[in-house]
Image (tube, helix red, strand yellow):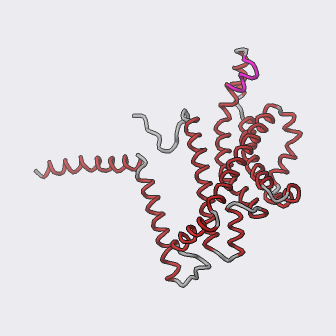
Amino acid sequence: MSNEADTTTRTRLPLRVFSARAVWQSGTSAPAASLALAVLVLLAWQYLPPMFGVPKYIIPRVSDLWNEMIRMWFQENLLRHFISTASMSILGFVLGGLLGAVAGYALGLLPTWEKVLSPYILALQIAPKVAFAPLFILWFGYNAWPKLIVTVLVVFFPILVNVLQAMRIMDRDLINLARAYNMSKTKIFLKVMLPYSMPNLLAGLRIGATLAVIGITVGELVGGEIGLGYLISFGQGQANTSMVFDAIGLLTVIGVIMYWAVTSVENRILHYLPRAVGAQRSP
């Protein structure tokens, strides 16, 4: 009996380990752990500052943030500010991504022009884009154009650099093989260069999705009259820490949604690439 029990125990143990591992790899445990961590952080945020005597104007409690959010919704037209920031972030991201991709592919196809323009591209890349916001306000006034242009510039350069790097390290044997089959330059670009550079392009878009929120916020902080960045500046002037925290949280939500959207598109386009993490092992 004891031998049978030991055998049964040894048989069940690997099954339990395998089941736990399967549940974790199935993708259900990681979101649950993230949610539990978020709950712990919110509880600590709610109760720890009063315990240590931290004033509300330094670190407001979660309940204070919620009450301020409701007040902003009814009295500060929060939805209008949120929609303005979200729409301008998306527009700046799309325009910056399109211009960066076009410029990257154009310079990759024209190496002579790349050598001529590379010092200027490097200078513009090093220059802090947010420092141009006051200059754009002087040129275009207090409207949507300064923050949109800042966002486009912030998004433009990471995508340009990623695409250009992919074009530089392109496998020339593939291009020579395509030429051996008498493919035209257009087909070589569409069938060889574009798919080869797609991972770099989408990686640049993921970076640009997060930088777009930064660019639009800087524009609204410097000279905006609407948007979440304006609410941050207004809350700072009123010493309303809860308003500042709420605006920062909503900006984070916009950035996370944009990042997830780009990641979802990337997973659909690059479904053929092997996954280093979570990939199934062949028997």
Q: Residue at x 72, y 56 (%)?
A: 216
Q: In which quarter of the image is the C terminus?
A: top left
Q: Which residue is drawn at 58% across and 71% down?
A: 68
> Is residue 185 located in the magenta-colored stretch of the structure?
yes
Q: Measured along the vertical axis of the image, is residue 198 above or below residue 218?
A: above
In the image, which residues are magenta? 183-190
> Percent from the top left, x then y, of residue 155?
73, 49
Residue 220, quarter of the rendered image: bottom right
Residue 232, quarter of the rendered image: bottom right
Q: Measured along the vertical axis of the image, is residue 24 above or below residue 183?
A: below
Does 51 sit left or right of 20 as displayed? right
- The image shows a total of numbered marks equal to 0
> Is residue 25 located in the magenta-colored stretch of the structure?
no
| Residue nearer the viewer, 247 or 151 | 247
Residue reaching furthest to the left: 1
Does 76 sit left or right of 121 as displayed? left
Residue reaching furthest to the bottom: 53
Q: Look at the magenta stretch and give its main secondary structure.
A: helix
Does 255 sit left or right of 165 as displayed? left
Residue reaching furthest to the front: 74
> Percent from the top left, x then y, of residue 162?
71, 42
Q: Measured along the vertical axis of the image, is residue 233 above or below residue 202?
A: below
> Percent from the top left, x then y, of residue 242?
60, 72
Q: Residue at x 59, y 57 (%)?
A: 253
